[in-house]
Image: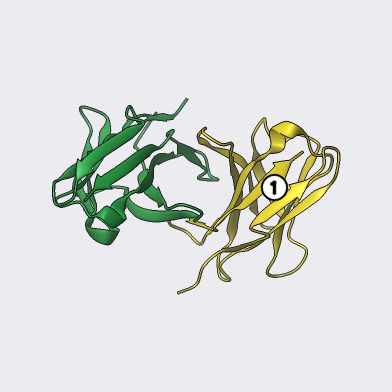
């Protein structure tokens, strides 16, 4: 059964460093999403991506965040200068038309 | 604004007993409702959804959910709980916009005791 994959599973970084979180969506899906879940809090929408451009972004998704689909398979989330409060679990999701399918998440720890 | 509430942080049930995990919603227009489950160190797995049709929706692993429009609820149920059902359960509503982003509840931790 096809699934969404994410790498790395855990990323530890120093405050101010850049990180890139990678996702491989399900191959025939057209819509892509990033969500995050700060420990003990609800899952929050960050950004949606369709037709090679951002279709919607939340107020959390400020200028330090960017997304890219550099080739036909990967979907990346870049955080340019990480802050302590960026520590969270980041989930990628994709869908064709129906429900969203989620990856296992990347746990980002900013020290 | 659309929102989802899960009033219980934790639910404890004995194995073999029925379980209910509660969810209420607030939407403008028709609700599109989802339940996802998160096992430790795993991603969010889709359980079931309500879009339209029968109010009782059946999903994966023997779970079902009942849509109640008058009470704006979408409670998750299972007739006989298993220890392996112990996990974090999230209710979500699909945003009315074209991007269909999901708006999430806080989650309910289900513990099934042997």
Work out which quarter of the rendered image holds the N terminus of chain A and state it: bottom left
For label 1, the residue is A54
Residue, x 58% and y 71% (percent of image)?
A27
Percent coordinates x, y for residue A44 in the rendering: 56, 37
Label 1 environment density (alpha carbons within 10 Å; few <14, some 14–19, many ≥20): some
- Residue at the (36%, 39%) spot, across then down: B109
Residue A26 point in image, percent of width and height: 56, 67
Check the rendered structure and report the hue given to chain B. Answer: green
Residue toward you, A22 or A9: A9
- State left or right for residue B20 relative to residue A5: left
Q: Can residue B95 be seen at all in this image of the molecule?
A: no
Task: Assign the C terminus of chain A to one quadrant of the image.
Answer: top right
Mark 1: which secondary structure? Answer: strand
In front here: A17 or A30? A17
Residue A26 vs A102, above or below: the answer is below
Residue at 70% x, 37% y is A86
| Point 14% across, 52% down: residue | B16
Give left or right: position of A27 versus B63: right
Q: Which chain is yellow?
A: A
**Image coords of residue B69 (percent x, y):** 23, 32
Residue B70's place in the image compared with A6, above or below, is: above
């Amino acid at each position: 059964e096809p699934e969404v994959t994410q790498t790395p599973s855990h990323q530890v970084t120093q405050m101010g460093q850049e990180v890139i979180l990678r996702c491989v969506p399900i191959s025939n899906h057209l819509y892509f999403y990033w969500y995050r879940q700060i420990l003990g809090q609800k899952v929050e929408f960050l950004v949606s991506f369709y037709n090679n451009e951002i279709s919607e972004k939340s107020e959390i998704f400020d200028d330090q965040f960017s997304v890219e689909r550099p080739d036909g398979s990967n979907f990346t989330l870049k955080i340019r200068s990480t802050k302590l409060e960026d520590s969270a679990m980041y989930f990628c999701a994709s869908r064709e038309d129906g429900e969203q399918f989620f990856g296992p998440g990347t746990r980002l720890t900013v020290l | 604004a659309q929102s989802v509430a899960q009033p219980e942080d934790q639910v404890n049930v004995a194995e073999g007993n029925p379980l209910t995990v509660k969810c209420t919603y607030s939407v403008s227009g028709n609700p599109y409702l989802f339940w996802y489950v998160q096992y430790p160190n795993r991603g969010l797995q889709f359980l079931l959804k309500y879009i339209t049709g029968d109010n009782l929706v059946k999903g994966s692993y023997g779970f079902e959910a009942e849509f109640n429009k008058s009470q704006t609820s979408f409670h998750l149920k299972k007739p006989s709980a298993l220890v392996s059902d112990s996990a974090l359960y999230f209710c979500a509503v699909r945003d009315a916009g074209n991007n269909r982003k999901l708006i999430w509840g806080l989650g309910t931790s289900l513990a099934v005791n042997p």
